[in-house]
Amino acid sequence: MLRLKYRNFQQGEIFFTDKKHSESPNRKREISAILTPKINKIIQQWGNAAHHSDNYLFPYLKDDETAEQEKTL
């Protein structure tokens, strides 16, 4: 969830690719979910204030972090 960016949101839905739970390592599964009022409230409360498409939804990751740095979150 921390890797979601504002560009993953379109017309009241969240779109992302699930690589971890795919049947094959090379196979990606596209997932979409409807933004409910509860989800919108969480985003308003905890989300990144700058709603640019390249910004992460939640302000905990930065683009220049390594995979090891991400694991510490």
Image (cartoon, rainbow, N blue to C red):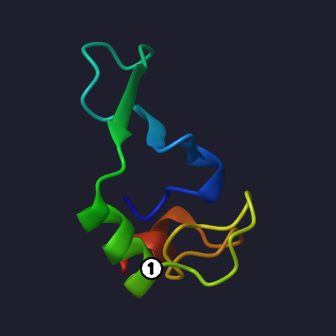
Q: Is residue 25 above or below residue 10?
A: above
Q: Position of residue 71 (x, y in %)?
A: 37, 71
Figure quadrant of the N terminus:
bottom left
Q: How many marks?
A: 1
Q: Nearer the viewer, residue 12 or 23?
A: 12
Query: Which residue type does callout 1 highlight?
Result: Gln
**Residue drawn at point x = 45 percent, y = 43 percent:** 14
**Residue drawn at point x = 49 percent, y = 75 percent:** 58
Q: Residues within 10 Å of mark 1 (few under 14, many from 20)?
A: few
Query: Which residue in the protein does label 1 denote?
Result: 44
Q: Nearer the viewer, residue 20 or 35?
A: 35
Q: Is residue 27 left or right of residue 55?
A: left
Q: Is residue 34 above or below residue 46?
A: above
The image quadrant of residue 62 is: bottom right
The image quadrant of residue 65 is: bottom right
Q: Is residue 53 above or below residue 60?
A: above
Q: Position of residue 67 (x, y in %)?
A: 51, 63
Figure quadrant of the C terminus:
bottom left
Q: Position of residue 72 (x, y in %)?
A: 36, 80
Q: Position of residue 70 (x, y in %)?
A: 46, 71
**Residue drawn at point x = 55 percent, y = 47 percent:** 9
Of all residues, the one furthest to the front in this rendering is 37
Query: Judging from the image, what secondary structure is the residue with disc 1 in?
Result: helix
**Residue drawn at point x = 31 percent, y = 13 percent:** 24
